Amino acid sequence: MNIIQQHSDASLAENWRTINIDLLDPESSSNFDTTTLHPAFAAVSADEARGIGQQVRQLLRGGDAEGALRGSLEMVPYGGDASAKEIHLQTVTEVLQSIKASEMTPMLQRIFQSEGGSEALDVLMKYLYKGMASSATHKTPSRGSTLTPQSTGFSQMGGRPGAGNESSGAAMSVLLSWHEKVVEVAGLGCINRSMTDWRKV
Amino acid sequence: MAAPEVHHLFHHPIADHSFSADKQTLAVARDTSVELYGRTGNGFKLKDELKGHDKLVTSVDIAPNSGRIVTCSQDRNALVWEPSPTGYKPTLVLLRINRAATFVRWSPSEMKFAVGSGARVIAICYFEEENDWWVSKHIKKPIRSTITTVAWHPNSVLLAAGSTDAHARVFSSFIKGVDSRPDPGVWGERLPFNTVCGEYLNNSAGWVHAVSFSPSGDALAFASHDSSITVVYPNGADQPPRAVLSINTQLLPFMSLIWNGESEIIAAGYDCEAFRFQGNESGWQLTGSLESKGRAGPEREESAFNMFKQMDLKGKTKDDTKLTTVHQNTISTIRVYEGSGGAVRKFSTTGVDGRIVIWNA
């Protein structure tokens, strides 16, 4: 056992080449604390998100689609975990799907002109993008793995709307028509805010 | 309202521009040099070129009284150009930064200037007589990302800075021997160097493109990438501000803004036109564009021959390659051109399209 042997053993054990040195530098941008970019959120559990969903559906059944939409956009579980957020996304998507195309623009205009309406539409825009993202990634594993053995980076390839099943294509078209209407009412600034905002839905 | 005065200097983006006090000289940052234009009749003519940087010049500022020009660049340097009978003489400033310098402005006293940088510091530079050097002191503490913009308070001690960490901050840049002790005001009472007098963030947290103090210095406005402007009314040291008003717009983000009196803000940016905001402590709103609509060139009488020729060549009859705004691309800088006591009569804008436009406020 010579010194070289000992030395290489030590370095193998430490595996130092795989250390991300950027994380060790407190000044590095990898250590930017993004929680400083938004206020502290109250924790929301999945059950609470489900409860909000029930209330919103109640309004929807009562025929108050606008109230349901506003309610779902105001009670956003920012502090919730992934499952709570997923549940609320479903709630919002359900509300969006139940509103007729002819009612979209007048309803959006009423919301936009009311108190805090601009923020409500910013939230809606975030849900539209989240909805599009999730319906595009849901089906990737099955199709992606059969068509492309190696990962090519085009993860959405297999999940194009309409390629897989009909219902996700329909859901996507609802989101797209909402997107068009929201931009008409709230402008491009709304898209900007949905991108910059750290209060993620 | 009289039509704005438009000069198309070149086909290249203008990073920043500055007029001398007598408005006869215009400095524009073009690529790695600063071009000085002199006014000749109705136009501007290239007079001189300040070559000293070897990377993109990001900002330029002419001190109104001394006539000194300060420039900063992505080569991490700032230069002070001293006017002399034989032309401008550059002096290097010791910035001690390891990233690009992004923005520079003279303080109203002209004794010092502030340089924002990608190194997460603001260098406050002043002239040290004994060494015959421009030296700098760094404001470092709570800054966590690139400084994109700075603006001076009228007292030359307080400095506002906007950063890509989405915060607009107000610092003290008090330097012993250079500044006289400032009067206590709404931003604080004791103001040693690097005191953080305020740190503001709006809800949607876009990174900050522009900051500006109101003419009295008692309010701060900033524009950020979430297409909003935010106005802050502070309430003395260690107190929460009296009001923080955020105006979300339907437009694209603003790159630059100026105050016109205490109750009006003019902002311009990616929409290629300037917009007016009006308000006070109880609320602000967007009141409209400064662009006079319908002015977009007289509709030319098209002959049938021309119409069919256009359709044949381009597949359409109207030429839609021109924007209806005066600027044909993003406006990156807006500055007061002429005004008194905080009220603006004329202001100038430059942008990516290489035009300089002088507007009536």
Image: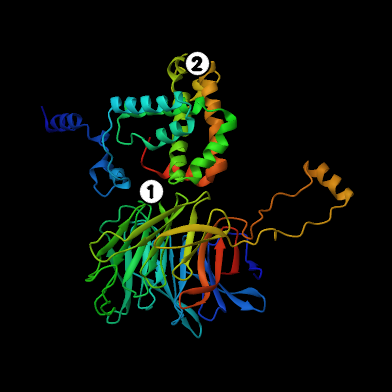
Q: Which residue is mark 2?
A: A147
- The numbered disc on residue B205 is 1
User: B88 or B116: which is nearer to us?
Assistant: B116
Q: Along the horizontal axis of the image, is B297 left or right of B346?
A: right
The reply to whether callout 1 and callout 2 are in contact (CB within 8 Å) is: no
* Residue located farthest toward the left when viewing the structure as drawn: A1
Residue at 31% x, 63% y: name it.
B234
Could you tell me residue B89's position as x and y percent? 45, 78
Residue farthest to the front?
Answer: A62
Measuring 39% from the left and 62% from the top, which residue is drawn there?
A: B281
Residue B251, image x, y percentages: 53, 50
**Viewer can see residue B34:** yes
Disc 2 marks a residue whose amino acid type is Leu
Q: Chain of mark 2?
A: A
Which quarter of the image is occupied by the N terminus of chain B?
Answer: bottom right
For this rendering, which residue is in front, B22 or B170? B170
Which residue is located at x 46 percent, y 65 percent?
B59
Quadrant where the C terminus of chain B is found in the figure: bottom right
Chain assignment, label 1: B
Q: Position of residue B155 (x, y in %)?
A: 34, 75
Element assignment for label 1:
loop
Mark 2 falls on what kind of element? helix
Residue A86 seen in render: no
Question: Which residue sits at x=48%, y=25%?
Answer: A156
Alpha carbon separation for disc pair 1 and 2 = 41 Å
